Amino acid sequence: MYDGMLRLTHTAMPGKLQKILPKKNLPLIHQILPVFVLAAFAVLASFLWQGHKGFNLWDEGYLWYGAQRVLLGEVPLRDFMSYDPGRYYWSAALMSLWGDNGIMVLRGAVAGFQAIGLFMGLLLIAQKSAPRFKFPGFLYLLLSAITLMVWMYPRHKLFDISLSILLIGVLVFLVQHPTWLRYFVCGLCIGLVAVFGRNHGVYGALGSAGVMVWLAVKSGSRRTQPGLMEGFLLWAAGVAAGFTPLLAMLLLVPGFAVAFWESIRFLFEVKATNLPLPIPWPWKVSFDSIPTDEAIRSVLVGVFFIGILIFSLVGIGWVLFQKFRSKAVSPALVASVFLGLPYAHYAYSRADVGHLAQSIFPLLIGCLVLLAAQPAKIKWPFAVALCAASLWVMHAFHPGWQCGASGQCKAIEISGSQLMVSPEVESDVRLLRKLAEEYTPDDRSFVVTPFWPGGYPLLNAKSPMWEIYALFPRSEDFQQEEIKRIAAASPGFVLIYDLPLDGREELRFRNTHPLIYRYIIEHFDRVPNSPNPAYQIYTSRKRAK
């Protein structure tokens, strides 16, 4: 199959282009193009299968709201609570090209970024697969694509997943030929990555530090590569250059610098980057209390949590040992083990499947690269086992599988597109539309807090509150500012999702934001007979009278 693709590519290449491109570059083109086609096909197939399935008022709504507001000229962090700006400007740019701010266009923009990440991951693996992509090589690459794709969850976090893969590629680029220019380019890419997510910039910096130290071990007095300090300075200059878009925003966008530094200060205030969950160790699984397939899935999840740590710790020791012995090591393995440990921190910061999926790609790519170079009797059993374990763990979380397996998804129109969603989501969307129709005529404002930021883009509305996703406790001063915003907006209704997040009473909205909660119950009237006891619905007191 791949040979046929390559012959077709070479035959279809215009004569002038064949003359322009040196013959020595043709193998590179023959390698890259089929990998790109496979990555694009895999992402397209996934999008066609489940692009119209599922809808998340929580995290996906958080991303959708930000993209919509950027299209309208607002600035992330300054005008609304958000991730770092890069992903919003990427999404808004593509949404603007399509002339649509709907959920399906957003998903398309995210899928485009996903394709870039998958292409990079498969390209790293392809370098170790069978030459010229004959059948065994293609089959292994296809198996790898399935393994990587099944872990690309949740879809609103595909930016983060792709960034982790791109960082591996950047470090491989440095390890292959550690020249002066490549140190700078490596830093440049990490600076750009940080524009999309500062946590990824930090993880990339930590991985780079490990790689630079590894490169400096027994490097001797050769001048073919910089020394440790020279390399670090070149790398740091590259980081500064790559971070220029955000530095420009800090300097030129009024109010953005204050909001940016406040977002950093808040991390130190709450002393956490996430709300922690207990680590799902495999030995804690109770086979007596849950179905067997779920028990096996829970055990495998625990094994993967342990695996990302063991892979990095053992791998770092191994590549250092080989370096001291002056033995060659796969650049992709070096990059993966040094990035694996920082990303393990992210997985353990909130130990659920979603965060595991966003942290596991150094492990996956490192293992698949290692296996690609092994004899068939080792390569195939372990690669198939890794793919099978991945499918067992992750298939049940994908919306395409959930809708197909349950058979209970309902059709609903969202932003002009027909989506298939769970009955619970369909009911929630209908509730929000009913409340908006009854209590917010003439585009009057409303408040939905703390967990449904997707309610605003669903109804093409602006949130009166800056904090559209109110998870952490806030200071009195912060709450007073939010109260001023609510009062100025005079919302027609307020919906408080009264849920103890993670089963923790201290994380109810009334406890994390007591001043705002008191303001709402004092200035709005509670609507009786809510469709869900957890949904506290209040209407404007002036309207009620």
Image (tube, grey):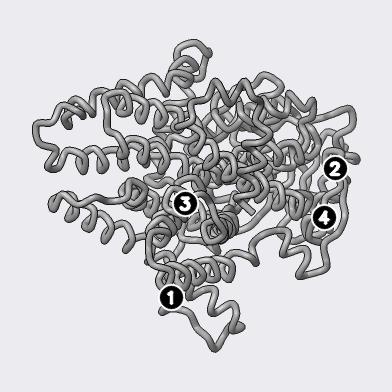
* Chain-order first, disc 1 or disc 3: 3
Residue depicted at x 40% and y 62% = 371
**Secondary structure type for disc 2:** strand
Name the residue carrying label 4.
Answer: 420
**Image location (x, y in percent) of residue 209:** 26, 38
**Residue under the image location 86 percent in, 47 percent down:** 418
Q: Residue at x 64, y 24 (%)?
A: 15
Give SS at disc 4: strand
Disc 4 to disc 1, C-alpha distance = 34 Å
One can see residue 451 in this view: no
Q: Earlier in the sequence, mark 4 or mark 1?
A: 1
- Looking at the picture, does residue 30 appear above or below residue 53? above
Judge left or right: residue 507 versus residue 210: right
Cβ–Cβ under 8 Å for marks 1 and 3: no
Occupied quadrant, residue 145: bottom right
Can you identify the residue that label 1 sits on? 282
Q: Return the mark for residue 131.
A: 3
